[in-house]
Amino acid sequence: MTRWFDLIADRKVIVCCGTGGVGKTTTAASIAVTAAQAGRNAVVMTIDPAKRLADALGVNGLGNTPQIVDGPWPGTLAAVMLDTGETFDDVVRRNARDAAHAERVINNRFYRNVAGTLSGTQDYMAVEKLAELTESNQWDLVVVDTPPTRDALTFLDAPRVLSRLLDNPIYKLVTSNRGGVFQIANRAAQTIVSQLGRVVGASVVDDAVTFFQSFEGMEQGFRDRALATSALLTQDATSFVLVASPRADTLDEARYFCEQLTSNDLSPDAIVINRTLPRPGVDATRAATLQHQLNQTSLESASIALSDLIRLSTDDRQRVQELAALAPEALLLTVPLLASDIHDVPGLIDFASRVCEPAAD
Ligand SMILES: Nc1ncnc2c1ncn2[C@@H]1O[C@H](COP(=O)(O)OP(=O)(O)OP(=O)(O)O)[C@@H](O)[C@H]1O
Ligand SMILES: [Mg+2]
């Protein structure tokens, strides 16, 4: 427990990842609660547009700016729900020459309708928001709750996502570095643009061309920022926490997340196995004897349930060992299956207090 506490007391960024429904949001919120209890200023940020984080914290709604959640702690707890569009607007404003330049880009129809939905934009903006929060100097710790998709860690690719946007064929066609003048670069490009216009509609192409033209001067700012944000994810003060369940189907998924981290030269610093079953104080042989003795009595079904629980919790422990073997360096933690969902601060405090290292066999 102390090592878990040390991790939460020491890191600047903790990213919770794992497959759907295992308890990422609850774990992320409980980490922020533990940090606030330790006197830190912690903010938990969710990339998931579903309202689960607000639900876990027992608040009505969350937005793109940190909202303070009150609780019995000396530190601060706040929560943010990433709004990709608003974050993109903020980035444009920061990189624009002046307010008029920013408004030109933001009001462009291509930007409004397409830019925010380009694949990878959400990933890029998630890292952007993370950087904004860490740079604000307001927060000692930013906890990131990732969405329930198998590719939740694609934001590790943020710089490549940005290059995809900037390497967009239309962007390349309309930009020319000669003398800093941005224009449809040559006759061949004009032909391609007009052919494209016949397929997708001339106004769509016009909007896109205007958008990329107005992007002039922002490119370097975007590229520099992407490098800085990717450095943020690989720094020592950033930890990844893999959340998993002891159920049979999660091993493959947990392995997949470990591989995703490894391919980015990262590894989880902790594995949280959520919803573990209690370990009865009797062994399987004793339970079988009990079941035999209680045969056809009113306690027979209870003795059968005890045997089942022993079998299930033994299987769980076996799988916990297999999960631990995926990242031998990681701190292994368990959280028991609780009687009810977690949907308010007292529930999160309770959840946080139950995170512990598994007892040795
Ligand atoms: N240890 C636990 N015992 C009982 N219920 C739990 C436990 N951990 C989480 N839950 C409940 O399980 C549900 C799913 O948890 P949570 O939303 O944290 O998972 P998630 O991994 O973030 O899901 P998603 O992948 O959909 O984002 C919630 O209703 C939560 O309150
Ligand atoms: Mg979630």
Image: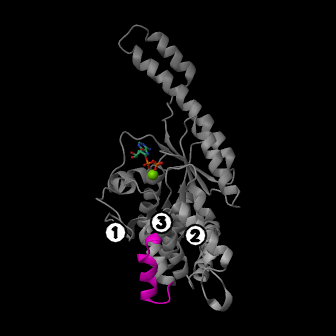
In this view of the protein, which residue sits in the foreground, 291 or 201? 201
What percent of the width, then of the height, locates residue 119?
55, 60
Crowding at mark 3 (Cα within 10 Å: few <14, some 14-19, many 20+): some
> Marks 1 and 3: CB-CB under 8 Å?
no
Report the residue marked by disc 3: 116
Report the residue marked by disc 2: 194
Crowding at mark 1 (Cα within 10 Å: few <14, some 14-19, many 20+): some
Report the residue marked by disc 1: 68
Kind of residue sitting beneath label 3: Gly
Which secondary structure class fits the magenta region best?
Answer: helix
Check if residue 95 falls in the magenta segment: no
- Measured Cα–Cα span from mark 1 to mark 3: 27 Å
In the figure, 356 relative to 252: above or below? Answer: below
- In which image quadrant can residue 35 be found? bottom left
Residue behind label 1 places its C-beta within 8 angstroms of ligand 2: no
- Mark 2 vs mark 3: give the one in front: 2
- Measured Cα–Cα span from mark 2 to mark 3: 24 Å
**Is residue 172 left or right of 214 when viewed as pictured?**
right
- Measured Cα–Cα span from mark 1 to mark 2: 51 Å
Tell me if residue 41 can be seen.
Answer: no
Q: Earlier in the sequence, mark 2 or mark 3?
A: 3
Kind of residue sitting beneath label 1: Ile
Kind of residue sitting beneath label 2: Ser
Where does the magenta region start and end? 96-111
> Marks 1 and 2: CB-CB under 8 Å?
no
- Mark 1 vs mark 3: give the one in front: 3
Check if residue 99 falls in the magenta segment: yes
